[in-house]
Amino acid sequence: MVQTNRETLKKIKLILILFALGAIGGTLGDLSHVLTGTTGYPQDFYWWYLPYGLPFWVPLLFGSLTVILGGTHIQMTLGTKSDLGSFQWRFSGSFACLGLYLVSGFLPWPAGHLSDLVLGLVSFFIWWTWDRSLLGLGGGVVAAILGTSFEIILVHKQIFYYQPHAANLFGVPSWLPWLYFAAPGTIGNLAVKISQKIE
């Protein structure tokens, strides 16, 4: 019974930590897109807005997605032995992934042009530097497909929108998959490292 309670408490701590990291990091990335005129949200539509016009559900969405991504990666790596490096190294990888998100809105080229190449190369560099595993590669492809498809649905449901210069792929930018591609090999591995550290 004591062991069961300890495991449950560990899972709750892990969920809260991952949720907090995702809520903060994801909201900062989303804010950068709003401030750079990459995305926007309908105003006077949601009942509560954060500063700069972000709907209240943005941190909740990113926090939940980080929990799902991290939890999935933990389950996929159970029983495997891999050198994840130090906690600082894994955190720097996730920070690089966030940096990719932040920078994407500041690039001067419209989607479908040089921005796709730049973000693609940086995304692949992040995977190669901080992960270099088949799991991270496959997870990146799956995340790119599912994440981009999910955003296309949200855009067509008018939940939010991309500005015309960043809406060349069914309403979303053609560089969007590269942001998702970098996530499993960085955020996923950080989640594994955090789960190992939680007592």
Image: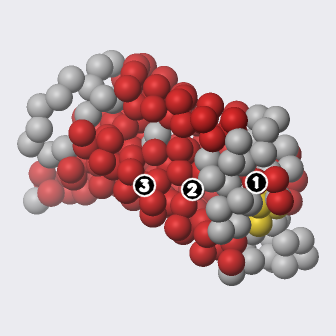
Residue sitting at the far right: 44
Coloring basis for residues: secondary structure
Q: Which mark is residue 143?
A: 3
Pinpoint residue 68: horizontal percent, then vertical percent: 39, 58
Relative vertical location of residue 84 with respect to residue 107 in this rendering, above or below: above
Relative vertical location of residue 102 with respect to residue 7 in this rendering, above or below: above
**Could you tell whether 170 is left or right of 48 in the image?**
left
Residue 116 seen in the current view: yes
How many residues crowd mark 1 within 10 Å: few (<14), some (14–19), many (20+)? many
- Looking at the rendered image, the disc whose residue lies closer to the viewer, 1 or 3, is 1
**In the foreground, 118 or 2:** 118
**In the foreground, 134 or 117:** 117
Pinpoint residue 122: horizontal percent, then vertical percent: 54, 29
- Looking at the rendered image, the disc whose residue lies closer to the viewer, 3 or 2, is 3
Q: Residue at x 61, y 47 (%)?
A: 175
Q: Secondary structure at mark 2?
A: helix
Residue 32 seen in the current view: no
- Which residue is the site of mark 2? 62
Residues marked 1 and 3 touching at CB (< 8 Å): no
**In the foreground, 81 or 156:** 156
Q: Residue at x 85, y 72 (%)?
A: 42
* Mark earlier in primary sequence (1, 3): 3
Q: Which part of the image, by quadrant, shows the N terminus?
A: bottom left
Relative vertical location of residue 39 with respect to residue 132 in this rendering, above or below: below
